Amino acid sequence: MCITKEEFRKKCLKKMKKRAANTLYLDAKINKRLQHLLKGCNKQTKILFYNPIKGEVDIRKTLQKVRKKSQVFTPFMVEKSFKMVPYRLPLKRKKFGIFEAGNSLQDLKNIDIAIVPIVGLDNNFQRIGFGKGMYDRFFGRLPKKPFTIFVQRERCQSTKSLCDSYDIKADLLITS
């Protein structure tokens, strides 16, 4: 039986909801791994973090730690995609319940590292997200692909190729 990307997404979302317990512990493990991985970054390193919504790994502890020594950016939604803006407070709740920093006139084109939440991934290490395609559109506009880290509490990976050619691919996956 052949499973579609949408069916697999639903299966992964169901698995995420079922595993809602121990999120603090699992997120702490992931934050520890992320901090270890990013410890060599310096003031010139540009890192794209996400602001977590319900169900996603809460990486705010790592964001707070890394922003002291690197340039940290977060998504700011624009139409069907987003642009990067410097992480700064206060954050405001926007569309889909996502907290965002204020808009910026900076038009950043390059980042060194991107930390991206996932719902699942296929056998090619390509991202299955929430189905809006925002990260795919954003990455499609970048002149140079950043080192991409997918984060997920519990691995949900297909043994088959489900994604399209434009779906972003991970360099590294961090799970609990």
Image: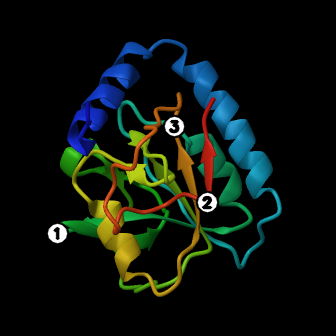
Residue 83 seen by the camera: no
Q: Secondary structure at mark 3?
A: loop
Image-quadrant location for residue 22: top right
User: Could you tell me if the residues under marks 3 and 2 are in contact, i.e. CB atoms within 8 Å?
Assistant: no
Decide if residue 63 is on the left or right side of residue 122.
right
Q: Count neighbours of disc 1 (C-alpha within 10 A) and say few if under 14, some if 14 to 19, many if 20 or more.
A: few
Image-quadrant location for residue 31: top right
Q: What x and y, as percent, mark residue 134?
A: 28, 62
Query: Residue type at mark 3?
Result: Gln
Q: Count neighbours of disc 2 (C-alpha within 10 A) and say few if under 14, some if 14 to 19, many if 20 or more.
A: few
* Quadrant of the drawing holding the N terminus: top left
Identify which residue, 4 or 116, lies in the foreground. 4
Q: Count neighbours of disc 3 (C-alpha within 10 A) and say few if under 14, some if 14 to 19, many if 20 or more.
A: many
Identify which residue, 136 or 91, lies in the foreground. 136
Would you name the residue on which mark 2 appears?
171
Question: Is 82 drawn above or below residue 119 in the view shown?
Answer: below
Question: Is 118 drawn above or below residue 172 in the view shown?
Answer: above
Q: What x and y, as percent, mark residue 52?
A: 42, 42
Q: Of marks 3 and 1, which one's residue comes earlier in the chain?
A: 1
Decide if residue 91 is on the left or right side of residue 147.
left
Mark 1 to mark 2: distance in Å? 27 Å
Q: Choose mark 3 or mark 2, whichever is in front.
A: 2
Question: Is 62 drawn above or below residue 164 in the view shown?
Answer: above
Mark 3 to mark 1: distance in Å? 26 Å
User: Could you tell me if the residues under marks 3 and 1 are in contact, i.e. CB atoms within 8 Å?
Assistant: no
Decide if residue 86 is on the left or right side of residue 4.
right
Query: Residue type at mark 2?
Result: Asp
